Every structure is written in C-alpha cells, then in structure tokens.
Image (spheres, rainbow, N blue to C red):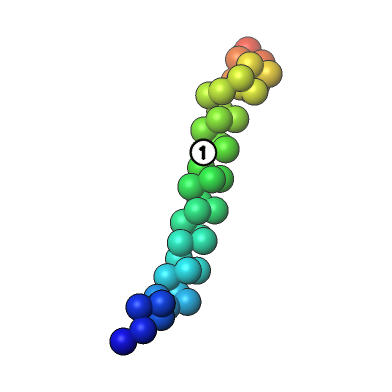
C-alpha cells in the first residue's frame, strides 16, 4: 500500500468548503450585529413612536 495515496472523496472537500463558508458568514454576521459596527445601527421600532 502506498502511504501517500489519499482515500478522501471529493464530497468531503465540498462539504468542508461549504461548512467553512457557512461558519465565516455566521461569524461575520455576529460581528456586525454585536461588535463595533453595531454602534451605527438604529432600532426602526424606536424611530416610529406611535
């Protein structure tokens, strides 16, 4: 047996790439919602006092 031969399927690579993109977008969303950029956000319900 050749120890340098890999047995991973292309599906595993695609799944890991999708997972990495999903985690990075989730992290970016949390950073935008709760990090320093959130100081510029306004609450639309507070803007319209009825």
Task: Report which quarter residue 38 is drawn in.
Answer: top right
Where residue 40 sits: x, y (%)?
68, 18
Task: Report which quarter residue 28 is drawn in.
Answer: top right
- Position of 44 compared to 19: left or right? right
Residue at the spot x=56%, y=23% of the render? 35
Q: State the residue in front, 47 or 39.
A: 39
Label 1 sits on a secondary structure element that is helix
Q: State the residue in front, 48 or 36.
A: 36
Residue closest to the far left = 1
Relative to 10, does residue 28 appear above or below in the rendering?
above
- Position of 20 compared to 38: left or right? left
Q: State the residue in front, 14 or 35.
A: 14
The residue beneath circle 1 is: 27
Residue at the spot x=64%, y=23% of the render? 37
Residue closest to the far bottom = 1
Where residue 11 sits: x, y (%)?
45, 75
Relative to 3, does residue 22 appear above or below in the rendering?
above
Q: Is residue 5 visible?
A: yes
Relative to 19, does residue 39 appear above or below in the rendering?
above
């Amino acid at each position: 047996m050749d120890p340098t031969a890999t047995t991973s399927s292309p599906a595993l690579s695609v799944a890991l790439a999708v997972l990495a993109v999903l985690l990075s977008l989730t992290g970016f969303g949390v950073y935008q919602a709760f990090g320093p950029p959130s100081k510029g956000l306004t609450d639309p319900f507070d803007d319209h006092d009825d």
